[in-house]
């Protein structure tokens, strides 16, 4: 039994913001603010946390957009990477989307984030576009999309 088999995925609450920001600061060079996370958690969008022994180790945020669920943020604490946590979050996202008759998952990723790009490609995402200067006008984003009819 792997670590991804023992995780609990549940909705985030505003009481988790301090832990979310800690992970965010660890994972990203231009982290989102606690105000952004609070607004997102209080919205009707998807905000899930992954817990082991009641400690937040990862999270996912996604927004509904007609026939697409747009993955806007996913992060896993450094000590828990490459253990299937992100994959578990994506599996739950796929199932949620399919139950809601959503056809696609989309996302942007930094052109320089080769680890994430490889991960999304391994998950069946296809490169569909790029956004020049998307990240603070400095770095381009690659836009990926996965058609959920290909998910079993």
Image (cartoon, grey):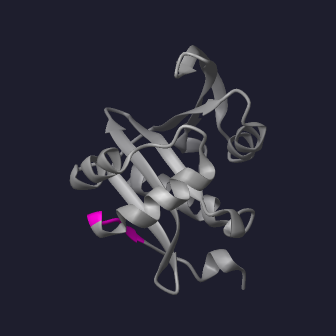
In the rendering, at what x and y percent does residue 2 appear?
Answer: 72, 80
Q: Is residue 33 left or right of residue 147?
A: left
Q: Nearer the viewer, residue 149 or 80?
A: 80
Q: Which residues are magenta?
A: 10-14
Q: Residue at image x 23%, y 50%?
A: 44
In the rendering, at what x and y percent does residue 123 appear?
Answer: 68, 47
Q: Residue at image x 64%, y 30%?
A: 110
- Taking the image as drawn, is residue 13 in sight? yes
Q: Residue furthest top?
A: 132
Based on the displayed image, in which of its 4 quarters is residue 70 positioned?
top left
Q: Where does the N terminus fall, quadrant-wise?
A: bottom right
Q: Is residue 117 left or right of residue 58?
A: right
Q: Is residue 145 above or below residue 34?
A: above
In the rendering, at what x and y percent does residue 14 appear?
Answer: 28, 63
Q: Is residue 79 above or below residue 28?
A: below
Q: Nearer the viewer, residue 54 or 64?
A: 54
Q: Is residue 8 above or below residue 78?
A: below
Q: Residue at image x 52%, y 87%?
A: 53
Q: Is residue 11 left or right of residue 108?
A: left
Counting labels gives 0
- Taking the image as drawn, is residue 90 in sight? no
Q: Residue at image x 47%, y 55%?
A: 60
Q: Nearer the viewer, residue 111 or 99?
A: 111
């Amino acid at each position: 039994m792997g670590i991804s088999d023992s995780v609990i995925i549940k909705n985030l609450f505003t009481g988790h913001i301090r832990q979310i920001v800690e992970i965010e600061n660890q994972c990203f060079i231009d982290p989102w603010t606690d105000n952004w996370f609070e607004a997102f958690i209080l919205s009707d969008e998807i905000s899930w946390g992954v817990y082991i022994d009641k400690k937040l180790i990862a999270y996912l945020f996604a927004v509904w957009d007609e026939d697409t669920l747009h993955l806007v943020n996913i992060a896993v604490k450094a000590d828990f990477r490459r253990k299937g946590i992100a994959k578990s979050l994506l599996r739950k996202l796929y199932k949620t989307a399919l139950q809601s008759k959503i056809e696609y998952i989309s996302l942007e990723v930094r052109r320089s984030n080769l680890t994430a790009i490889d991960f999304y490609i391994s998950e069946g995402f296809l490169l569909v576009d790029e956004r020049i200067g998307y990240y603070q006008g400095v770095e381009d984003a690659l836009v990926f999309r996965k058609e959920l009819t290909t998910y079993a």
